[in-house]
Amino acid sequence: MSFIQRYKTMDKTERANYRKEFFINNSLYMFLIAAVVVIQFISPHFLSGPSIVNIISLSAANLPIALGIAGAIILTGTDLSAGRIVGLVACVSASLLQATGYPNKMFPDMPTLPLVLVFVIALAIGALVGLINGFCTAKFNLHPFIVTLSTQLIVYGALLMYLMIGNNNGQSISGLDSSYTGFITGSFLSLGRTPIPNYVWYALIITVIMWFIWNKTAFGKNMFAVGSNPDAANVSGVNVKRVITLVFVLAGIMYGITGFIEAARIGSNSAATGLNYELDAIAACVIGGVSFVGGIGKIRGVIMGVVLLRLIFVGLTFLSIDANMQYIIKGLIILVACAIDMRKYLVRK
């Protein structure tokens, strides 16, 4: 029976309740879309070609970290260390890929390493911290909030110590090799006269891979099973501890990719790189319908959440809204999204 046929079979009260639930459950989407329309009306250049490319680019840069955190949320957890992992990976990648002959090169006697090698190092750093997060969560039955709060501080301390190595003395790391910046921020396709950076296509490839992992592998099915009911999953033969550990390892890999891209994207990396990135990722996930009650989430929802959030914040910039005020708006969006998510859960229950 189609939706229209099912709707016609409802009586007046059922239709009224359905409409009420529909508007409540989708109120945040409606508000965000309405906000985009209002911003476009006030500032007609908001959805111009260059602005659209900018929104797509910012969304692509934030998509891998959101896909990583989404897995932790599906397990009814979160990951507070994500932003600091991104920062550490970005600074390590930048330091190893500074141009030869750059006056303030962090390691002046070291040649610029091959891109592939540094990319592998970036993935390894992210995977290692993810392994620590997952192992401590699964082995010792600790809540991911506590575990990742601890690793957030550990990684940040490691980052500060790393920035003091060599000739850097805590300064920002810049002067990146052109092969690195060209690989990440170069372009072979444009929208009008505005070039689309290469990392947009990398984010698209990563998204396809994550969709396949979530939807077409036994690991993906087990992840949702553990998130829905770990006890039932355990009885069904799922190795719950292994699944939890691998989810955080995969998340760490996503943070490593984000850091590798971010280093070249921003060009100058410091201890502030990655600060609060996890907040944007969590907000995007809850807006996209990834539920903190566990076992619920879709890749397309994460994409939608990331894009909508970028639309709003780029729009606020167009309206010259104070940057400090944007933090308040971001917090309200997360609060409202979580409240709506919990209401859906209570209604289903």
Image (cartoon, helix red, strand yellow):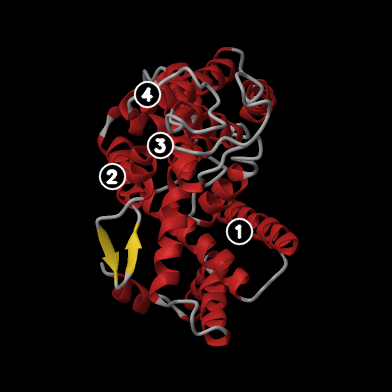
Any mark on residue 205, and which?
A: 2
Q: Which amino acid does label 1 sit on?
A: Ile
69, 346: nearer the viewer: 69
Q: Badge 1: few (under 14), some or many (20 or more) residues near its Cα, within 10 Å? A: many
Observer able to see residue 295: no
> Are the residues at dot 2 and dot 4 in contact (C-beta closer than 8 Å)?
no
Q: In which quarter of the image is residue 141?
A: top right
Task: Identify the mark nearer the N-term, 2 or 3.
Answer: 3
Circle 3 — which element?
loop
Residue 177 - label? 3
**Residue 63 pos. (x, y %):** 44, 48
Query: Which residue is tagged 4?
Result: 113
Discs 3, 4 touching: Cβ within 8 Å:
no
Q: For the residue carrying disc 3, how many other residues have a C-alpha within 10 Å: few (<14), some (14-19), or many (20+)?
A: some
- In front: 128, or 305? 128
Does residue 314 appear in the picture of this structure?
Answer: yes
Q: Which of marks 2 and 3 is in front?
A: 3
Callouts 2 and 1 close, C-beta under 8 Å: no
- Residue 109 spot, x, y in % from top left: 47, 17
Can you tell which mark lies on residue 340?
1
**Tag 4, which secondary structure?**
loop
**Which comes sooner in the sequence, label 2 or label 1?**
2
Q: How far apart are marks 2 and 4 (CA)?
A: 24 Å
Which of the 4 image quarters holds residue 208? top left
**Given this view, does label 2 or label 4 mark the residue nearer the observer?**
4
Q: How far, Cα to Cα, is label 2 from label 1?
A: 31 Å
Determine the CA span between mark 1 and mark 4.
48 Å
Question: Where's residue 37, x and y in %?
Answer: 51, 81
Residue type at mark 3 is: Asp
